[in-house]
Amino acid sequence: MRVADRKVAQAAGVNGLLFTATAQHPAAQPTVTGTGVGPVRIGVDYAGLVATYGGNWAASLRLVQLPACALTTPSLAACRRQTSLAGRAGSQDPHRHHHA
């Protein structure tokens, strides 16, 4: 997992954490389609965001997917198109994780 700089996230239209995730061993679990696309499970410890976003921040957590070009050409509207992903916050406890 690689976390993007906050300026990169803002340029991509993200008011929060922007990260990329890749399989550690892509060949270990091939997908049904063989395209490298399939379900994943990601845990994000968002305890460090308390000071940055304050207020009722935990209630507004959501997980979205952006096209890869969001990191390279965020000026294109298509590169900032967010697709909501299923996920859940562990609880209102700021030391819990968000899972997708």
Image: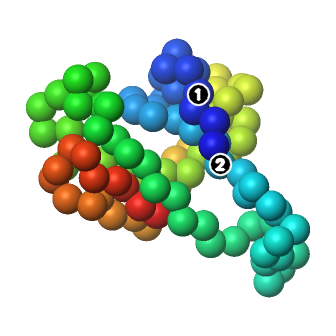
Is disc 2 surrounded by few (<14), some (14 to 19) or many (20+) residues within 10 Å? few
On the image, the x and y values in percent for residue 80 come to 58, 37
Name the residue rendered at 30%, 48% in the picture.
61
Mark 1, residue position = 4
Residue 100 relative to residue 68: left or right: left
Looking at this view, is 9 or 54 the one in front? 54
| Render colour scheme | rainbow
Left or right of residue 66, residue 92 in this image:
left
Q: Mark 1 or mark 2: which comes first in sequence?
A: 1
Report how many numbered discs are placed on residues in the image: 2
Pick out the residue farthest to the bottom: 32
Residue 80 in view (yes/no) = no
Residue displayed at 87% across by 68% down: 27
**Residue 55: quadrant of the picture:** top left
Q: Does 40 sit above or below residue 76?
A: below
Q: Which percent across, then down, holds residue 33?
A: 83, 79
Q: Secondary structure at mark 1?
A: loop
Q: Which quadrant of the view contains residue 49?
A: top left
Q: Is residue 64 above or below residue 49?
A: below
Q: Residues within 10 Å of mark 1 (few under 14, many from 20)?
A: some
Q: Amino acid at mark 2?
A: Ala
